[in-house]
Image (cartoon, rainbow, N blue to C red):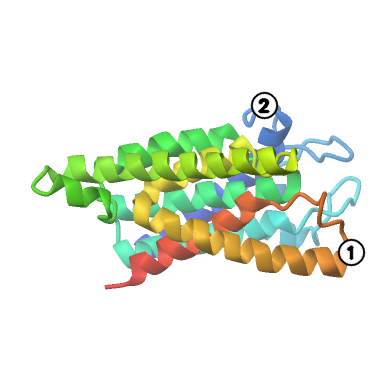
Amino acid sequence: MIEALAVIAGLLAGSFLNVCIWRLPRDLSVVRPRSLCPRCRNPIAWFDNIPVVSFALLGGKCRHCRARIPIRYPAVELLTAALFWAAVRMHGASPAALKLGLFAALLVGLIFADLEQRILPDEFTLGGLGAGLAFAALVPVEPGLVSLFLAGAHPRLASLTEAAAGAAFCAGGIWLVGQLYYLIRRREGLGLGDVKMLGMIGAFLGLRQTLLVMLLGSLIGSVIGLLYIRLARKDAATYELPYGTFLGIAALAVSYLSASLP
């Protein structure tokens, strides 16, 4: 029963994420106006806004102008539902499942916003940073290097310190790399959005797992980026890779694989 509720919650969360992915990079309110077709501007009725179902019934097209609805809409809804289901499957109805589900939703929003617009909205990154630190006091972050210096400390203090260290060191480290890149190449290599996103990931995962995310994200980005540049014949010197997308994929992999281990 709880797993079915998690799927429904994931579908609804995914529907809201689609609104955020479209509107936040454009500095639009996610509350008003109501959902409408970006081409014909007709409002979308509630029965045309049911996650996944409406897309299937409409054949992936707007009811009014027949413009194609991006496949991203059902993809985000199904992905978020699957991630919510997996969180509850592993942790049951618990704060740990809530933390993992929220983290996953934030990552899905960032993955697609960066992929489409090359923007990582502050609402996701900075809001997620605060949420990650708050959850660190409720759900322990995996102990890492910082915890060695806090032997005997209260578990909540140790967890919060580990989360804060993960946010600070990883965000600061990637910021420094970006500054060095700029000094050498005289152009921006990493934006502040990537820095803030790593701060958010660090707050949720702690220092050790976030370092793994950085390594895995860089590896994924290098492989996929080079393949895309070669196949699409892009200029490697000027093409902007969506690093946040690769970080998000890596963070999902690390967080869910670590949660599934005994």
Q: Quadrant of residue 168?
A: top left
* Image quadrant in which the N terminus is located: bottom left
**Left or right, 190 with reference to 215:** right
In the figure, residue 135 lies in which quadrant? top left
Residue 130 appears in the rendering: yes
SS type, badge 1: loop
Outermost residue, left direction?
A: 152
Of residues 44 and 166, which is closer to you in this image? 166
Q: What residue sits 16% from the left and 45% below the top?
A: 150
Give the label, 2 or 1, closer to the camera: 1
x and y percentages locating residue 54 in the rendered image? 70, 55
Outermost residue on the front side: it is 184
State whether residue 130 is above or below residue 64: above
Q: Nearer the viewer, residue 179 or 103?
A: 179
User: From the viewer's perspective, is 92 left or right of 105?
Assistant: left
What label does residue 233 carry, if any? 1
CA gap between label 2 and label 1 equals: 40 Å
Identity, as a three-letter code, of the amino acid under mark 1: Arg
Type of amino acid at the residue the image marks with label 2? Arg
> Where 230 sits versus 70, above or below?
below
Q: Tally the numbered discs.
A: 2
